[in-house]
Structure formats: structure tokens, C-alpha cells
Image (cartoon, rainbow, N blue to C red):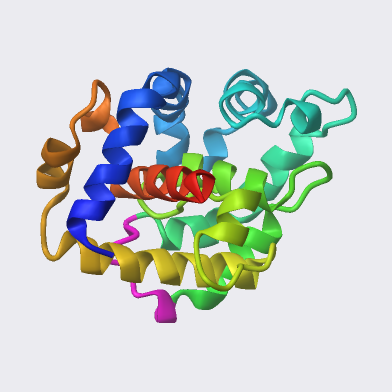
Amino acid sequence: MKFERFVQVVRRFELEDGFADILYLEAIRKLEEVRKDYQKLNERIARRIIRPFLANWGRMGRNVERQDFDWQLLVEVIKNQRGNLDKLRRETILDVRLGEVTSIIKAVFDGMKVRQLGPTGISKVLHLLNPELFVMWDLDIRRKINDKSFSASSRGYFDFLRWIQSELIEATAGRIIDEIRDEVGGEYIDEKTLAKLADEYCWRTAREK
């Protein structure tokens, strides 16, 4: 992927869709302490922050607004994965050596499975827990972003991360995140990670196809 193409697509997202990210950014801010210590996550925080993020920003209201959605179970599975999440805490999508953490990423993805939270929802929750590393995806991205579609599984998600990392390495060509933000522009750009900008690129590209 060329840097110019990446900037062009993300810039269009920022101009036309970026305002909706107010809820996204607030969720990221509110979960800052949780990311420092996953033990601080509880059902109240999950319902107050993760639920509206998934329901409104993530357009998953049909899944997460159900009365039988078990928020306490989601809290428990996240805490069960805190050891693996801690191992990935300092990783970024650009710098992580994916070959060395394959089993960890797959275990985290598989460990997040709860009823009504499919692969799209899992990727969104993982991004909230580590917005520098985990890139969000959805059905359109899985099917349209690449010549070969990615399976809706931990293997597929790992393959997607490996693919987007390769694209980002080529596109950024050693540029630091501040340079990329400056090129893209946007009202909230300074608060977004490269993993979030990668999501914007994938989301916009998949829908334009």
C-alpha cells in the first residue's frame, strides 16, 4: 500500500465520518485505568462504557442490548486473559513481532468468546483493551479488504493482523505517528492510534468496494 493511498482514504473517513468518533474516544479515555490493571474492570464499567460503545458506535445494539447478554461473564473472560493481555501491553501494530506472539493473540481472541459477541465484537473489545495493537474488523472488512477473505476465527484474525501490519509497514515507510496524523488531519486525529487509523482505512476501503 502506498502512503498517499492510506492518507487519502483515512482523510475521507475523518472528513465524513470522524465526528462519530466522539463516543469512541470517550470510551478509550474512560478505560485508561482498566488498561493499566485489568483487575479494575467490573460489570458496572462494562455496562456503562463497553455496552454503549458496542451498541451505538459499533452498531451492535441487536446483540449487546439483549436482556440475556451476560456482562459479568464478559468481565470474567477478560480477567481470565489478563496474563496474555499483559504480555501484549507494550506492543503496537507496527512493531509487534507477530510470529513470536501467535499463540498469545489466538488465545486472547478465543478466550473472549461469549454468547452474542461474535468476531466483530471481540475485535472491538480487544481494541478497547489495547488500542495500539488490536485493529478492529467486521464482516465487510473480512470479505472485501483483501483478495482472499479472512475466516471469522482466531486464525483469521491473526492473518488479518499480519496482513494489515505488512500494509502499514509499506505505507508508513519509517514515518512516526505524528507525521501520519499531520498528513491526515482531522478534529480528533491527535488522539488516535495507528491501529485506529488502520481500522478507518479498512472500513472505508471495504465499503467503497
List the single residue furthest toward the bottom. 99
Q: In this view, does 134 lie above or below 167?
A: above
The residue that appears at 32% across and 57% down in the rendered structure is 92
Could you tell me what secondary structure mostly forms the magenta stretch? loop
Tell me if 187 is positioned left or right of 174 in this view.
right
Residue 35, percent across and down? 44, 40
Residue situated furthest right in the rendering: 68
Residue 98, picture quadrant: bottom left
Quadrant assignment, res 100: bottom left
Q: In this view, does 167 lie above or below 72?
A: below
- What residue span does the magenta drawing correspond to? 90-100
**Residue positioned 60% across, 56% down in the render:** 81
209 left or right, relative to 117: left
Q: Residue 105 location in percent, x, y?
A: 53, 66
**Image location (x, y in percent) of residue 144:** 56, 59
- Asked if residue 180 lies left or right of residue 110, the reply is left
Q: Residue at x 28, y 65 (%)?
A: 1
The correct choice, above or below, for 160 with respect to 64 in the image is below
